[in-house]
Image (tube, rainbow, N blue to C red):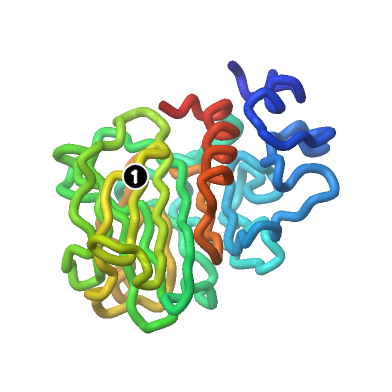
Amino acid sequence: MEYTNLTTGDIESVYTRNYPDPLNNKGELIYPLFAQGGSYDEDGLRLYLNSGISDSYSGTGVDWFDLTSNSFDALLYNDPVYSTNNGGLLALNGVDNYADVDPTFEVDLSKEFTVRMIVNPSSLATSRHALATFKTSAGTSFTIFIFASNNQVLVTSMGNNIVNSRTVTPLIADTFNEVLIKYNNGGITLLGSFEIYINQVEDSRASGANLGNGTNITTIGAVPIGTGRFFLWRGYIPKVEVFDKLTTTAEDLSRYNADKLIYNLP
């Protein structure tokens, strides 16, 4: 199904909630939670970058705007290539393309939060590539990595201490995937505070107790160390969402089904 041909009926068929018009006035698909009369600040959404919505990225320039009222806008570096495929994509080249989020943005380790990303890995040349590095309120940081050898996902600290063991399920190369990270402030049983879900399947859990030295900025598509950027992502990251809560199973499924229409998720 082509993104530009989506109709209200198509979208309502996968939603459990009924809204009069799930497209905005530019014909762009938005979640039912944010349909007409709604707000991008609903349901705990704290950061929302989406290259498929022109209010977030216009198709040109260096500004990737946060769609929430928090204005945690990101700055794109070295001209990633934009295309209108799948509603709007920024191609990161694995060499020098990345996006730095407003330096005031951080995730609060004293509270629950959820990170959700839609990603598409291309052929990866080096051992690991960073989906994103997140600055935390505790002066630490963590990075969501993918291993080039097997496309497995893990969460690490800046000191490269493994916070979460690799997922069993790999991401599918040259295909869009959903990566969901949930942090429960130590409340999750078994191994600890982080949960990783790959395309709606919980795949791994581990402790967040060993986060290492932090960075002063959140970066999409790289690890920031000083003024340098390392382990750069090669492929697409059209959507980044951070919620200041643990999202529910019903919310997760609704968002996954909405994005399945756009990105043909597995």
Q: Amino acid at mark 1?
A: Glu
Question: Percent position (x, y) of residue 144?
Answer: 32, 56
Which quadrant, please, contains the N terminus? top right
Farthest residue in the front direction? 189
Name the residue carrying label 1. Answer: 202
Category of crowding for the residue at label 1, using alpha-carbon neighbours closer than 10 angstroms: few (below 14), some (14–19), many (at least 20): some
Seen at 36% across and 39% down, the residue is 201
Farthest residue in the bottom direction? 139
Question: Percent position (x, y) of residue 77?
Answer: 46, 57
Seen at 57% across and 26% down, the residue is 261
Q: Circle 1 sits in a helix, a strand or a loop, which is it?
A: strand
Taking 215 as reference, is 128 left or right? left
Q: Is residue 26 visible?
A: no
Q: Is residue 136 visible?
A: yes
Question: Percent position (x, y) of residue 13?
Answer: 67, 23
- Give the total of numbered labels: 1
Seen at 41% across and 72% down, the residue is 135
Residue 33, placed above or below residue 219: above
Taking 170 as reference, is 201 left or right? right
Seen at 47% across and 51% down, the residue is 116
Question: Percent position (x, y) of residue 96?
Answer: 35, 53
Taking 190 as reference, is 39 left or right? right
Of the pair 266 and 93, the residue shown nearer to us = 266
Which quadrant, please, contains the C terminus? top left
